[in-house]
Image (tube, helix red, strand yellow):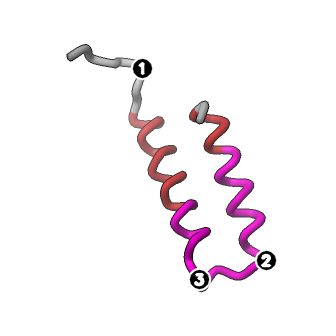
Amino acid sequence: MTKNSDYTCADYREEMMLLSLRRRLEDPGVSEEEKPAIRAGIKELEKSLDI
């Protein structure tokens, strides 16, 4: 197994933020007005993470 030193704490943090936004988007309690902002945050994080 090789060690990947390019993976940082910042990468992990962004992944967890992305996961949180995806879960929030699926939450039935989230208003329709909030969803576009959540989707924009998801898109921004995916671009940052090259997903």
Cα distance between the residues tagged 3 and 2: 13 Å
N-terminal of the pair, mark 3 or mark 2, is: 3
Res. 35 image quadrant? bottom right
Q: Residue furthest left?
A: 1
Cα distance between the residues tagged 1 and 3: 37 Å
Residue 16, horizontal then vertical, whole percent: 45, 51
Residue 37, horizontal then vertical, whole percent: 74, 63
CA neighbours of label 3 inside 10 A, class few (<14), some (14 to 19), many (20+): few
Q: Amino acid at mark 1?
A: Asp
Q: Amino acid at mark 2?
A: Glu
The residue at which mark 2 appears reads as: 33
Cα distance between the residues tagged 2 and 1: 37 Å
- At x 71%, y 59%, the residue is 39
Question: What secondary structure is marked by label 2?
Answer: loop
* Cβ atoms at labels 3 and 2 below 8 Å apart: no
**Looking at the picture, does residue 2 appear above or below residue 38?**
above
CA neighbours of label 2 inside 10 A, class few (<14), some (14 to 19), many (20+): few
Question: What secondary structure is marked by label 3?
Answer: loop
- At x 65%, y 52%, the residue is 42
**Looking at the picture, does residue 33 appear above or below residue 44?**
below
Q: Is residue 39 left or right of residue 13?
A: right
- At x 69%, y 44%, the residue is 44
The residue at which mark 1 appears reads as: 6
N-terminal of the pair, mark 1 or mark 3, is: 1
The residue at which mark 3 appears reads as: 28
N-terminal of the pair, mark 2 or mark 1, is: 1
